[in-house]
Image: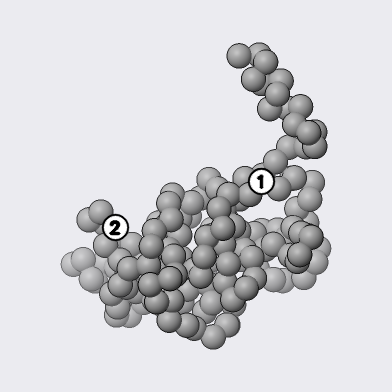
Amino acid sequence: MAEQSARAVDRPTGRVGLPLVVFVLDGQEYALHLSSVERVLPMVAVSPLPKAPTIALGVINLHGQVVPVVDIRRRFVRPSRDYGVSGQLLVARTSRRGLVLPVDEVLGVREVPVEGVTSADAVLPGIGHVAGIVALEDGLLFIHDLDTFLSLDEEGQLTEALEEMEG
């Protein structure tokens, strides 16, 4: 057992890694902390959710639970798109609720060195919703902070819309 622990510390890089789930939107790589991602699903039909905030695409039924689907593209004022059958859904959890994020493709889990993560405010002050940025050989990796993804107003609207739907 001690040998396993020693091997985990003595990685070839000698660095502590941060496990991230990396996904793609419009050719740009983004990530979420592995601990906030529950699973990846193939795209399914999304049902409308009346009175939901504009960031919400609707809801899906996930094993008998109604879970809101929120669009990262809308958060960053990017053009919406039809994901079709090739898109994927990231089922994730904030400190307050479960969310589903439609993405173009999930690339998998990547471990990045903790010291390689730059604070988003150090690069682009006021960027919001981004916990950190990692410089990669082929571009930047933006790490999303799901706990700040929805504003308090959006959170309240979403809760009300879900309660009304279930009520």
Q: Amino acid at mark 1?
A: Glu
Colour setting: one colour
Label 2: few (<14), some (14–19) or many (≥20) C-alpha neighbours in 10 Å:
few
Q: Quadrant of residue 156?
A: bottom left
Q: x, y percentage for residue 133?
A: 73, 60
**Quadrant for the C terminus in the image:** bottom left
Q: Residue at x 79, y 60 (%)?
A: 137
Q: Residue at x 67, y 15 (%)?
A: 3
Q: Residue at x 56, y 58 (%)?
A: 107
User: Mark 1 and 2 residues: CB-CB less than 8 Å, in contact?
Assistant: no
Q: Quadrant of residue 75?
A: bottom right
Q: Which mark is residue 62?
A: 2
Q: Secondary structure at mark 1?
A: strand
Q: Please report whichever mark, 1 or 2, sits nearer to the chain's N-terminal start.
A: 2
Q: Is residue 40 left or right of residue 163?
A: right
Q: Residue at x 62, y 45 (%)?
A: 19
Q: Which residue is mark 1?
A: 111
Q: Residue furthest left?
A: 167
Q: x, y percentage for residue 61?
A: 26, 62
Q: Is residue 126 left or right of residue 46?
A: right
- Relative to the observer, which residue lies in front, 145 or 91? 91
Q: Quadrant of residue 96?
A: bottom left
Q: x, y percentage for residue 126?
A: 72, 71
